[in-house]
Amino acid sequence: MSKEVRVRFAPSPTGPLHIGGVRTALFNYLFAKHHNGKFILRIEDTDQTRFVEGAEDYIIESLKWLNLIPDEGVGFGGNYGSYKQSERKTIYQKHIEELVAKGKAYYAFDTAEELDDLRAKGEDAKEPFIYNWSTRNQLKNSLSLPENEVQSLIEKGTPYVIRFKIEKDRTILLDDLIRGKITIDTNTLDDKVLFKSDGMPTYHLANIVDDHLMEVTHVIRGEEWLPSMALHELLYEAFDWEAPRFAHLPLILKPEGKGKLSKRDGDKHGFPVFPLEWKTDEGLSKGYREEGYLPEAVLNMLALLGWNPGNDQEILTMDEMIAQFSLEKVSKSGARFSPEKSIWFNHQYIQQKRPNDLLPEFNTILQTFGLEANDELSLKVIELLKERANFVKDIAEQGKFFFEAPSTYDEKAVKKAWKDDSKEILEDFSALLQETDFTADALHQAMQTFVDTKEIGFGKIGMPLRLALVGALQGPDIPVIMELIGREETTKRIKSLINAQS
């Protein structure tokens, strides 16, 4: 590509960032880095009625957690700011005046009530109302009213919007990098509002102006904006600007049924749809970070929702994704989200981590259990248990008995493991332990020698001993448990079980 690639992620601060938005940010990031370009964060906050306090900070924190660090943007600096649309009003004012002067846009004084009435009449007549070439000359706007009346209305402070004047009888040829060639008849388009009565631009004007001034070369965004592509191409033409290349990403679909993935699906089935948790007066929505997902696993999972590297590889590092990413390999059809697959990805990444990488989170979780962390023991427990874990919290939950002796014993396990001779067997084995090296190999041999000498089955010592150490009939190999907790603690736990059953 001859020009430096510049892409932008432009969320609105109207609430938490959905993982569909995260995937849009990721695909922009991968495309930029693949072409040694720039990834820009722009906050599109022109709709002040939907602004949510804290949403902007949430977006930035989410990108930082995922390590999708913008090269420019709100909170990251750059030479094309401001990167927040609410701080660019004078820029939009200048450009909308240019369109009006060119005859490409016009003032419209119709009230919301008048337009609602026209829409209702259109529905009754089964002829949907559309504000365009077919109706504009019969409505209250600067195309139908005398110039002096228009000026008078403006001077009196009559509320107005500014609409884009769509040409009649034109065929627009569009070329989307994912969807391919698209043909649009301008007679089907309405004269979109570009400037609202509150003095703020709509998305359509603001994003066109900003993309041009910020020298954006590729607009990679969600499928929901595909119907606006023709309007945006016409706006570029109206300004005599070169349009960027467009690419519209497929939807992320519900795990089952029709439609796109929503917050309601996450609430219903108990999985997160936001990168970080989001608290409101109505409650708390789960976040991938707080649920224990690793950011690398979340990104890997999202990358393969709608994009395929062209091989069977599923686990990809960020460098591998950057190297292999191309819009040509992005699917046109929706990608179905799988909660189970997201857990699978996290499991794979947990396995790749060294115990030291997982230690801080592991110790933090132990502390929430009221347990005192011990780095040396923690590292050994992580190494021992992580193979079967999907999350670090699984390791902590399964391994907390290493840090705290059982205070109760599973009732079903007691019935199964505790027999009339269990007290004598444990006392005899406990005595043997005082003369045994406390390594897993030596302890295993001691157990084998013990059952051979006593001429008993392995379960006669194994089950009550495991019950004493764990409080249940689960956990890793008994000799390994004994080695990690040590001779004194092992002996103490055996005595506690004997006393509890006496």
Image: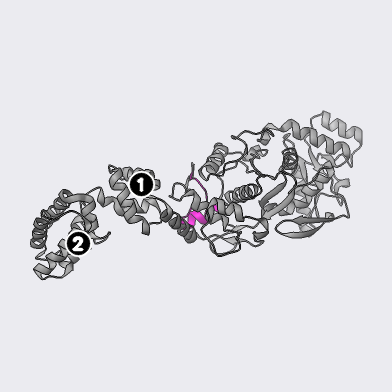
Residue under the image location 74 percent in, 60 percent down: 180
Task: Choose top left, top right, bottom left or bottom right for residue 53.
Answer: top right
Q: How is the image coloured?
A: one colour
Residue 81, position as x, y percentages in the image: 68, 33
Q: Amino acid at mark 2?
A: His
149 falls in the magenta region: no
Q: Amino acid at mark 1?
A: Phe
Does residue 144 appear in the picture of this structure? yes
Mark drawn on residue 292: none
Say whether residue 281 is left or right of residue 143: left
Provide the secondary structure element on which disc 1 rests. helix
Residue at label 1? 362
Badge 2: residue crowd in 10 Å (few <14, some 14–19, many ≥20):
some
Quarter of the image where the C terminus is located: bottom left
In this view, 217 is above or below 332: above
Say whether residue 352 is left or right of residue 406: right
In this view, 363 is above or below 436: above
278 falls in the magenta region: yes
Badge 1: residue crowd in 10 Å (few <14, some 14–19, many ≥20):
many
Residue at label 2? 444
Residue 51, position as x, y percentages in the image: 61, 38
Residue 252, position as x, y percentages in the image: 59, 57
Q: Nearer the viewer, residue 141 or 48?
A: 48
Residue 270, position as x, y percentages in the image: 46, 55
> Magenta region: which residues?
261-279
Q: CA distance from mark 2 to mark 1?
A: 28 Å
Provide the secondary structure element on which disc 2 rests. helix
Q: How many marks?
A: 2
Does residue 471 appear in the picture of this structure? no
Residue under the image location 53 percent in, 41 percent down: 64
Residue under the image location 65 percent in, 37 percent down: 48
Q: Given this view, does label 2 or label 1 mark the residue nearer the observer? A: 2
